[in-house]
Image: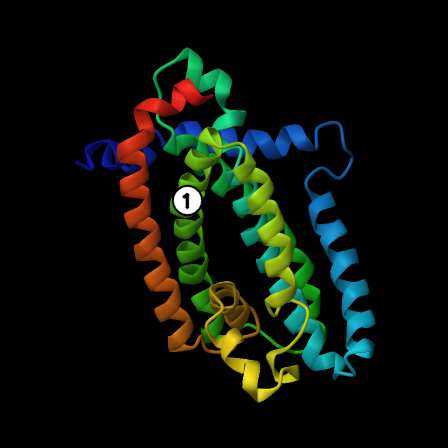
């Protein structure tokens, strides 16, 4: 029943050079003929983080040494999550020329988006290093959890992104819906604000906000703090749900996708 979906997953390893090349090419083409190239990603993120950190620390009346690393780590992680979801809406539509003219695997084009945004995250991470050094968050054993956290986040980006891509190919309104939801979720997720600012009676919303848990598995290692077991539990459950939905959706609609492009 799930053979077509499994073939798509196997193609990631068998044809890794295709999505690897496409992902790097996207970054190169975006910044060709630019003096700094992809370093513009780092500079623009640094300007955004440093200005927001100074402003919101005063607005929220928070200690700058505590708030600055919190904001910076959350912001670069949120950019990765939000861009993955937004760009996944067009994953198959943008690859229309490939998919309509040759028999290939849809998973390669979702992996292209995952790799592209992982490279952008790596560039944005460079903007966090000065903050870690200045505010003495440091890099220790807890920081090593960044790698399994990124793997979990990327796995979810692939499976959930593929589901969104398939639905968006059939219903083009999905792209607008996802974009609107991401904008709302940004304000209810502790990217810029700290959960300690919330009253106790609404703290439960943060505790079970799935986007907050995804932030936690990246933010905690960046701040050299242990990742909570609750965050890993919630993320693991969401991962399993994403895998199941991917198997169901791709098995049912894979052969129809090319006709919806």
User: In the image shown, does 25 or 249 lie closer to the viewer?
Assistant: 249
Indicate the position of residue 177 as horizontal and vertical percent values: 57, 44
Query: Which residue is at the far top?
Result: 101
Task: Indicate whether 249 appears above or below 70.
Answer: above
Indicate left or right for 198 with 218 as reference. Answer: right
Q: Residues within 10 Å of mark 1 (few under 14, many from 20)?
A: many
Task: Indicate whether 206 appears above or below 49.
Answer: below
Asked which colour scheme the image uses, the reply is: rainbow
Tell me the residue at 47%/21% (across/down).
261
Indicate left or right for 59 with 96 as reference. Answer: right
- Tell me the residue that label 1 is attached to: 158
Tell me the residue at 43%/14% (across/down).
100
Indicate the position of residue 254 as horizontal and vertical percent values: 32, 28
| Residue 68 image-quadrant placement | bottom right
The number of discs equals: 1
Indicate the position of residue 122 as horizontal and vertical percent values: 58, 51
Tell me the residue at 40%/61% (across/down).
148
At numbered mark 1, what does the secondary structure look like: helix, strand or loop?
helix
Indicate the position of residue 88 as horizontal and vertical percent values: 51, 39
Query: Which residue is at the far bottom?
Result: 200
| Residue 222 image-quadrant placement | bottom right
The answer to whether residue 119 is visible is no
Task: Indicate whether 52 appears above or below 203.
Answer: above
């Amino acid at each position: 029943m799930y053979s077509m979906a499994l073939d798509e997953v196997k193609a990631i390893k068998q044809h890794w050079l295709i999505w690897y090349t496409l992902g790097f090419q996207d970054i190169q083409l975006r910044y060709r003929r630019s003096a700094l190239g992809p370093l513009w990603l780092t500079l623009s993120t640094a300007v955004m983080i440093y200005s927001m950190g100074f402003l919101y620390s005063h607005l929220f009346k928070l200690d700058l040494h505590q708030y600055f690393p919190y904001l910076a780590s959350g912001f670069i992680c949120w950019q990765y999550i939000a861009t993955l979801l937004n760009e996944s809406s067009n994953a198959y539509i943008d690859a229309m020329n490939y998919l309509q003219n040759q028999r290939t695997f849809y998973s390669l084009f979702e992996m292209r988006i995952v790799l592209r945004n992982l490279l952008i995250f790596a560039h944005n991470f460079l903007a966090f290093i000065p903050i870690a050094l200045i505010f003495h968050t440091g890099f220790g054993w807890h920081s090593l959890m960044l790698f399994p956290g990124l793997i979990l986040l990327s796995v979810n980006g692939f499976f959930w992104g593929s589901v969104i891509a398939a639905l968006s190919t059939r219903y083009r309104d999905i792209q607008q819906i996802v974009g609107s939801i991401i904008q709302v979720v940004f304000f209810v997720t502790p990217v810029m604000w700290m959960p300690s600012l919330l009253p106790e009676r609404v703290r439960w919303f943060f505790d079970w906000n799935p986007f907050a848990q995804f932030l936690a598995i990246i933010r905690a290692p960046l701040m050299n703090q242990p990742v909570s077991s609750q965050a890993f539990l919630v993320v693991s459950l969401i991962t399993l749900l994403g895998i199941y939905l991917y198997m169901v959706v791709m098995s049912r609609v894979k052969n129809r996708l090319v006709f919806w492009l």
